Image (tube, rainbow, N blue to C red):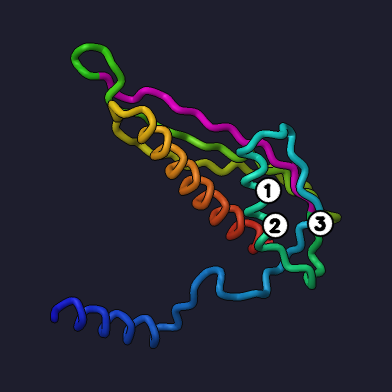
Amino acid sequence: MKKIIIIVIALFILNNCGYTPIYSSKEKNFYIEKISKKNSTKLNSKFANNLKIFSNKNSKNIIEIEIDSVKKIETSQKDDKGDPSRFQMTIVLNMNIISENYNKTKTFSSDFNYSNDANKFSLKQYEKKIENNLISKIVEKSIIYLSDF
């Protein structure tokens, strides 16, 4: 019963405060004409595919983007035996934005700490989920940055 009351109150507050989701507006003020990748890696391809979704073909602000991304997995903590017990995954996206008015380079990064798993298959599956989540976070940051132009 308490959950229902909290949900109703939250919906009432959010409905009346002018809240709008970041991506609800179809009118983005940029059009990505071309996305070039420095390296043809899966990570760069994932970024390129996610960025294309938010491009507005009707916009007069036409940009080209050159991307280069790196994923690092480092041991952040070891157990008493010296085996890794925690890892840190970091993904960095370097973006060169080219337009007729400007040429800027911007770096976006996101990281996540997670525990080791004895089952290596489930660890790899979990790492794929983490990678996709980090990519989504970085794409959100980059779309917000590109929307400010």
The residue depicted at 63 percent of the width and 47 percent of the height is: 47
The residue depicted at 76 percent of the width and 57 percent of the height is: 32
- First in sequence: mark 1 vs mark 3: 3
Which residue type carries mark 3?
Answer: Glu
In the image, which is nearer the foreground, mark 1 or mark 3?
1
At label 2, counting other C-alpha atoms closer than 10 Å, the crowd grade (few under 14, some 14-19, many 20 or more) is: some
Q: Which residue is mark 3?
A: 33
SS type, badge 1 = helix
Farthest left residue in view: 1
Q: Is residue 69 left or right of residue 74?
A: right
Q: Which residue is mark 1?
A: 48
55 is higher (above) or lower (below) than 68 = below
The residue depicted at 54 percent of the width and 56 percent of the height is: 140
Membership of 108 in magenta stretch: no
Distance between the alpha carbons at the discs numbered 1 and 2: 6 Å
- First in sequence: mark 2 vs mark 3: 3
SS type, badge 3 = strand
Which residue type carries mark 2?
Answer: Lys
50 is higher (above) or lower (below) than 43 = below
Q: Which residue is mark 2?
A: 52
Distance between the alpha carbons at the discs numbered 2 and 3: 9 Å
SS type, badge 2 = helix
Which percent across, then down, holds residue 35?
A: 76, 48
Give the dominant element type of the magenta stretch: helix, strand or loop.
strand
Which residue type carries mark 1?
Answer: Ala
The residue depicted at 28 percent of the width and 16 percent of the height is: 83
Which percent across, then down, holds residue 123?
A: 37, 33
The quarter of the rendered structure image containing the N terminus is bottom left
Assess whether mark 2 and mark 1 are in contact (beta carbons under 8 angstroms): yes
